[in-house]
Amino acid sequence: MKDIFKQILNEIIKPKLKENGFKVFGNTFHRQESDFLIVFDIHKSSWNSLNDISFWLEIGIYNETYYKFMFIENPPKLIRSNNCSIRFHSSGLIDNGVASQNYQLTKDTFESTTQKINSDLDNSILPFLNKLKHVKDVLVFGKIDPVYCNDTNLFVGITLAKKGEKAEAKKLINEYLQLGNYPENWVDRITEMSKRFNL
């Protein structure tokens, strides 16, 4: 099964992502846009057996400004999707938005799984990623997955604040604060950051 998984990775996933401007780092792929990095990861289940491999594709959005604000530390050398505060399972873009639906690979499902990955990449995943050019485009993540992408407004707001787009930044950050009941120390950090940017 490992050889079949590598075949799918090397003959389907890697070429398609490279054709669409992604750089390859093992099972992680990066494409740099002007204000953010698109991160595309392939994850395998820890419950896999010799004859059955379950895996999924995860998409993340990253920039260093937000990472340092969020985690108060320097980022790792290789950014993976689990370093992104905005990330979601790619099945949210396909199958009518059925979340957390993995690909199942066995000897019997190789052909059907290959066809599905080809279709998902060509018809759903890559067209979606190719629309992400401006940081404001990232706001769509909050609509696709409001749970895992619940800080999308804050991410975009902080990024715009650094670019000097203060009015839009202030609006998005205020919307974020109004949407949730956050711990006082988190609200204080956001307020202090807003003051530094003169919002």
Image (spheres, rainbow, N blue to C red):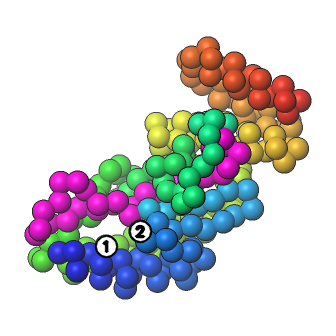
Left or right: 54, with 36 as reference point: left
Percent coordinates x, y for residue 97 in the rendering: 39, 52
Question: In which image quadrant can residue 44 be found?
Answer: bottom left
Callout 1: 10 Å neighbours few (<14), some, many (20+)?
A: few
125, 43: nearer the viewer: 43
Instruction: Tell me, yes or no, whether the highlighted magenta stretch contains residue 49.
Output: yes
Mark 1 in CB contact with mark 2 (< 8 angstroms): no
Percent coordinates x, y for residue 184 in the rendering: 61, 14
Q: Secondary structure at mark 1?
A: helix
Three-letter amino acid code at the position of disc 1: Lys
97, 185: nearer the viewer: 185
**Up/down of 26 relative to 164, above or below:** below
Q: Residue under circle 1?
A: 116
Magenta-drawn segment: 42-68
Q: What residue is at 41 percent from the left and 68 percent from the top?
A: 27
Q: What residue is at 56 percent from the left and 74 percent from the top?
A: 23
Left or right: 20, with 187 as reference point: left
Q: Secondary structure at mark 2?
A: loop
Q: What residue is at 89 percent from the left and 29 percent from the top?
A: 198
Q: Quadrant of the C terminus?
A: top right
Residue 27: give its label: 2
**Up/down of 10 relative to 153, above or below:** below
57, 120: nearer the viewer: 57
Percent coordinates x, y for residue 78 in the rendering: 54, 60
Question: In which image quadrant can residue 70 be found?
Answer: top right
Q: What residue is at 60 percent from the left and 49 percent from the top?
A: 75
**Up/down of 185 relative to 139, above or below:** above
